[in-house]
Structures are given as structure tokens and as C-alpha cells.
Image (cartoon, helix red, strand yellow):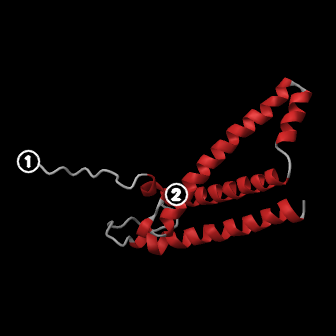
Amino acid sequence: MAKDRRHPNRLGIWGWVGGGSWGPDRYLYTLHRITGLGLLAYFLVHVVVTSSRALGEAAWEASMARVSGPLFVLGEYLVFVAFAFHVINGVRLFFAELGWGIGKPIEPIYPYRNCLDDQRPWALGALLLIAVLVVVGALDFFVWH
């Protein structure tokens, strides 16, 4: 009788979210998923609020009154942060998928050297660029605005 090689996912949601010993690359991947879902949710809400314009000036003014105030400014800033992360990390992943700047493929033997040696600097560079965008965005949202 052949041994069953299937392994059920006993970790549930934590197996999807938690990186465990996978390192920062796994957390970037998970955060990329979460920001993508958050941006999708924001887009759907944005379409609903914006569509109230078709119902007339009074409906538009009522919708805009519901989504104004300091709490919504903070929410818009968080959408900007999610967008900045998602775009910059997406460009990094795009380059990694095409094999640009990460070297030739090697035998996948743990610890994965191309991940540690080639992709980690790209990830750290992306995080640095994201941090700069987040700070400039905070200045624009809360200081210069």
C-alpha cells in the first residue's frame, strides 16, 4: 500500500498569514496579499460612494458628508500607504519573476542562496523606498495639506 503523501493544512489562517521561519520575504508576500485585498475593498467602496453622483446633487452632498472628517483623512492616508507598498513590492516581484537582477537559477537546496543573496537586497531596497514614500505621504496628508 502506497503511503499517502498529502499533508493537510493544520495551521488554517495562520498558515496563510504567519511566515514562521521563512524570513522577511514571506512577510512581504503576505503583506502584499493583504494590501491587495484592502485596496480592492477600498475600490468597491469608492465606486459606491462615487456612484451617488448619478442620483443628484443632494445624494452626492450627503455621501460626501458621510466620508469627511479627520478619521477619513487617516483612512485615506492608510490607503495611500497600502497603495505605495503594493506598487513598489509588485514592481520588485515583477523583476524577480522575469529574473532581472537576481542571478541565474540554481538547484533549490535549503537555505535558498539566491533568495538570501540576491532577492533580500531587492526587498530591503523596496522597503527603503516604501518608507520614503510613506514619510512624504504623511507630510502631504498631515503637514502640508
Give the quadrant of residue 140.
Answer: bottom right
Q: Residue at x 52, y 67 (%)?
A: 101
Which badge, 1 or 2, is on the more N-terminal residue? 1
- How crowded is the residue under tag 2: few (<14 C-alpha within 10 Å), some, or many (20+)? some
Q: Is residue 119 visible?
A: yes
- How crowded is the residue under tag 1: few (<14 C-alpha within 10 Å), some, or many (20+)? few
Three-letter code, disc 2? Thr
Residue 16 appears at what percent x and percent y?
A: 45, 54
Three-letter code, disc 1? Met
Residue 24 appears at what percent x and percent y?
A: 51, 69
Q: CA distance from mark 1 to mark 2?
A: 38 Å
Give residue 30's mark.
Answer: 2
Image quarter of the C terminus: bottom right
Give residue 40's mark.
Answer: none
Whether 138 is drawn above or below 44: the answer is: below
- State the residue position of label 1: 1
